[in-house]
Image (cartoon, grey):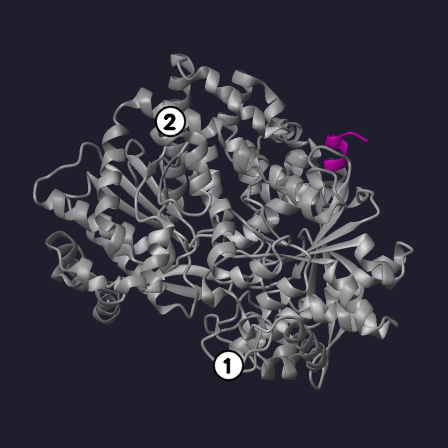
């Protein structure tokens, strides 16, 4: 049966109509069913070892286009739909985006699953099936408002497996119900799985925003990703979530090990477990507990698990290295407490440094410490990040276990972040160097041969301009914002966090606003685009969003400034919006305080689509700069060694925001937060709180780098005017982006860590 007949069979069975008479929604459901069935039919890759990739997030994005591409059906489906009077893009708009992640951590996990499957490796993801995601973001009164994001429909990518696992908490049990989504390999006929655990009777969406009864564990455990941890109930719920995920996942691992014909004593030989950040850390004591239940001694169980589990560190921020009160674990997972105490005892016996213990003097369980002691690999996610871990943040552990530490610079799947989201650029690349780069992204470097080809450079500029015009139409339809597509698109899209320094970008906007009001007109119009969500309990991050939205309204209503400067913040920024905006970006803002961004992956996606990086020497920016060369990136800011020095207060040189605030230019920009213009539009209390924080604390040192940031950004804006020179910068960035393919990253994980 050919593709047309298969689609027609589905539409007739479901809707009583031939496909020619179906609407976009009906065709979407038919394609979902067809594609889901085709991916589910694919067998898993072979191999004696199997990987389980544990992550609290899998930000997979919409899957119809991605899976059609992996199945090799995308062009055929597009032509069929066109013959019926439908556009594939319009049909894909019917798909809700799965709310299973938030930021870079979750998107990385999704890219990794894609690459594991594409490389024909045997590896499944393990996570939770969140019903309402992080939240759906709305803007009201220039503030973020959080509402549930119910994405699950009667027809989705999730397949009920019929498998159920009992998770025993303190005083009650819960059944973990397993749903699967297939992850097809792009260049083979195999598919892995994303395993998602859910409770049996999930609660309906909350009626009042995202507020719900956090003590109702049985129904709300899988409601939200990262429940508000501003109170003890929210923090405790996170522990319940984490144990639910790892307990069910550990049971699945041992069940599948037995089904493959192996005993528990051979776990390490046939299984690899990757712990993605500290959220799944309890898989270590849970696997040990389950192995001892199956007859292994404690020594044997510890040995097996220590040769099975590997840990990826994604941050040096202290608040992100989880430390849970032992009392929380006693309540949520009491059967783990004796295991954790025994693991801590063994550490103390082998290592006299109390700072390396799992349990500290406050009875806090240090999850990262447990991962390092009882895992066989510890990896950072960019060259700079890994060196900081080894030399500073985790130095005592590196001194103990130097052979465990390794670097795996992050990558992104160019199948989604170039081929799928930017077909015009993909076609141009194919015409220049052929399609072989799709399976071997390193071949993109062949574009360097076209550096002096005026025709290619001109077409590259046309591709970018078309993407900008397309994005402008999409934003106008969604939010009623009408932008100038001929302006420079200066883009900062990432989770809202002070270390990512959206507040510094906002101060640049203030500078440009004041310049224009004073008659100093920029050489060309600038549009500053933001996309970000702030965690519900992260008050200062929400204040920064408030400032950006107030600046957006201020400029929209100013006929003098509006022709030269625009600000737009995308509401409910997600993977779909990223796929729209990234092809349109001219400047990629990667301005985190040096030493704070582990890697970044947005920088890689933007680079691959021809945006030029404006950034600090932080995370993977360092490697981008090495690859593209100094003429094709704009760098600024204090280097990581100096930043670490300022935090350490060595020689009495501790950073003091007031020292930088009390300069005429900086003081004027910061004080604008309390100007009559902004106070008329914003919440005086929130703006004052942000003003006090920036001038008095500024923990992530925006004022340290502000003046150089403004100067270097102005340089980029001026140089954008030389269109041929800018096109060359674009071409170099695209050509050198192949290194940041997640296929390369996964090959390195497999060669050095998993050995599947």
Give the magenta part as a residue range.
1-7
Q: Residue at point 24% right, 55% down?
A: 703
Q: Which residue is mark 1?
A: 232
Sooner in the amino-acid sequence: mark 2 or mark 1: 1
User: Along the line of sight, which residue is nearer the eye, 247 or 549?
Assistant: 247
Front position among marks 2 and 1: 2
Q: How would you rate the neighbour count of disc 1 (Cα within 10 Å): few for under 14, some for 14-19, many for 20 or more?
A: few
Q: How would you rate the neighbour count of disc 2 (Cα within 10 Å): few for under 14, some for 14-19, many for 20 or more?
A: many
Residue 218: in sight, yes or no? yes
Count of marks overlaid on the render: 2
Q: Residue at point 73% right, 62% down?
A: 306
Residue 130 in the image: above or below residue 422: below
Residue 115 x, y percent position in the rendering:
65, 41
Q: CA distance from mark 2 to mark 1?
A: 50 Å
Residue 128 x, y percent position in the rendering:
65, 63
Q: Main secondary structure of the magenta part?
A: helix
Q: Which residue is mark 2?
A: 729
The N terminus - image quarter: top right
Q: Which mark is residue 294?
A: none
The C terminus - image quarter: top right
User: Hey, which quadrant is residue 523 in on the image?
Assistant: top left
Q: Please, what secondary structure does the residue beneath circle 1 have?
A: helix
User: Along the line of sight, which residue is nearer the eye, 687 or 589?
Assistant: 589
User: Hey, which quadrant is residue 249 in on the image?
Assistant: bottom right
Q: Residue at point 13% right, 44% down?
A: 515
Q: Residue furthest bottom?
A: 171
- Residue 45 magenta-highlighted: no
């Amino acid at each position: 049966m050919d593709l047309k007949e298969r689609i027609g069979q589905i539409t007739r069975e479901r809707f009583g109509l031939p496909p020619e008479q179906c609407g976009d929604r009906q065709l979407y459901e038919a394609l979902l069913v067809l594609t889901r069935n085709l991916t589910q039919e694919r067998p898993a890759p072979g191999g004696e070892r199997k990987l389980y990739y544990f992550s609290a997030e899998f930000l997979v994005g919409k899957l119809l286009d991605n899976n059609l591409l992996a199945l090799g059906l995308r062009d055929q489906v597009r032509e069929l739909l066109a013959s019926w009077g439908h556009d594939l893009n319009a049909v894909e708009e019917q798909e809700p985006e799965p709310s299973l992640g938030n930021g870079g951590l979750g998107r990385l996990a999704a890219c990794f699953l894609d690459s594991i499957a594409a490389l024909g490796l045997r590896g499944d993801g393990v996570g939770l099936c969140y019903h309402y995601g992080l939240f759906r973001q709305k803007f009201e009164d220039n503030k973020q408002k959080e509402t549930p994001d119910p994405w699950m429909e009667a027809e989705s990518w999730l397949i009920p497996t019929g498998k159920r696992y009992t998770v025993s908490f303190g005083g009650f049990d819960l059944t973990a119900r397993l749903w699967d989504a297939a992850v097809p390999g792009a260049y083979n006929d195999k598919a892995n799985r994303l395993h998602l655990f859910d409770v049996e009777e999930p609660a309906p969406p909350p009626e009042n925003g995202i507020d719900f009864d956090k003590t109702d564990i049985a129904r709300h455990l899988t409601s939200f990703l990262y429940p508000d941890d501003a109170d003890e109930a929210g923090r405790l719920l996170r522990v319940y979530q984490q144990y639910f995920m790892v307990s069910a996942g550990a049971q699945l691992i041992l069940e599948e090990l037995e089904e493959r014909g192996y005993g528990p004593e051979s776990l390490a030989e046939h299984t690899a477990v990757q712990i993605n950040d500290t959220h799944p850390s309890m898989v270590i004591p849970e696997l040990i507990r389950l192995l001892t239940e199956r007859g292994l001694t404690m020594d044997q169980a510890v040995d097996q698990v220590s040769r099975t589990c590997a840990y990826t560190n994604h941050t040096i921020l202290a608040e992100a290295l989880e430390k849970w009160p032992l009392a929380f674990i006693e309540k949520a997972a009491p059967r783990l407490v004796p295991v954790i105490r025994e693991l801590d005892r063994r550490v103390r016996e082998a290592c006299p440094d109390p700072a390396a213990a799992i349990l500290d003097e406050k009875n806090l369980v240090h999850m990262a410490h447990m991962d390092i002691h009882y895992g066989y690999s510890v990896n950072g996610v960019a060259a700079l990040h890994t060196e900081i871990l080894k030399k500073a943040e985790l130095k005592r552990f590196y001194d103990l276990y130097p052979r465990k530490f390794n670097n795996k610079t992050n990558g992104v799947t160019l199948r989604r972040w170039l081929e799928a989201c930017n077909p015009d650029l993909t076609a141009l690349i194919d015409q220049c160097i052929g399609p072989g780069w799709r399976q071997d992204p390193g071949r993109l470097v062949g574009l360097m041969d076209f550096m002096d080809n005026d025709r290619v450079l001109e077409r590259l500029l046309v591709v970018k301009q078309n993407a900008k015009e397309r994005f402008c139409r999409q934003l106008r339809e969604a939010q009623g914002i009408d932008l100038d597509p001929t302006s420079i698109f200066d883009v900062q899209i990432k989770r809202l966090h002070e270390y990512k320094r959206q507040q510094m970008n906002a101060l640049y906007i203030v500078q440009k606003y004041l310049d224009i009001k004073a008659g100093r007109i920029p050489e060309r119009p600038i549009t500053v685009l933001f996309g970000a969500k702030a965690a519900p309990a992260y008050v200062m991050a929400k204040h920064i969003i408030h400032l950006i939205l107030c600046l957006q309204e201020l400029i929209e209503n100013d006929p003098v400034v509006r022709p030269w400067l625009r600000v737009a913040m995308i509401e409910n920024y997600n993977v779909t919006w990223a796929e729209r905006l990234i092809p349109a970006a001219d400047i990629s803002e990667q301005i985190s305080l040096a030493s704070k961004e582990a890697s970044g992956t947005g920088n890689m996606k933007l680079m691959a689509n021809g945006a030029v990086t404006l950034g600090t020497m932080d995370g993977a920016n360092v490697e981008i700069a090495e690859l593209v060369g100094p003429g094709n990136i704009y760098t600024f800011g204090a280097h990581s060694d100096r930043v670490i020095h300022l935090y350490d207060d060595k020689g009495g040189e501790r950073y003091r925001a007031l020292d930088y605030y009390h300069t005429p230019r900086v003081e004027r920009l910061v004080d604008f937060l309390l100007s009559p213009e902004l106070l008329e539009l914003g919440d005086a209390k929130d703006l004052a709180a942000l003003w006090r924080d920036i001038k008095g604390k500024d923990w992530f040192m925006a004022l340290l780098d502000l003046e150089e940031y403004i100067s270097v950004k102005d340089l980029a804006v001026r140089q954008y005017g030389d269109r041929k020179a800018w096109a060359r910068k674009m071409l170099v960035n695209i050509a050198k982006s192949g290194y940041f393919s997640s296929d390369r990253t996964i090959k390195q994980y497999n060669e050095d860590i998993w050995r599947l």
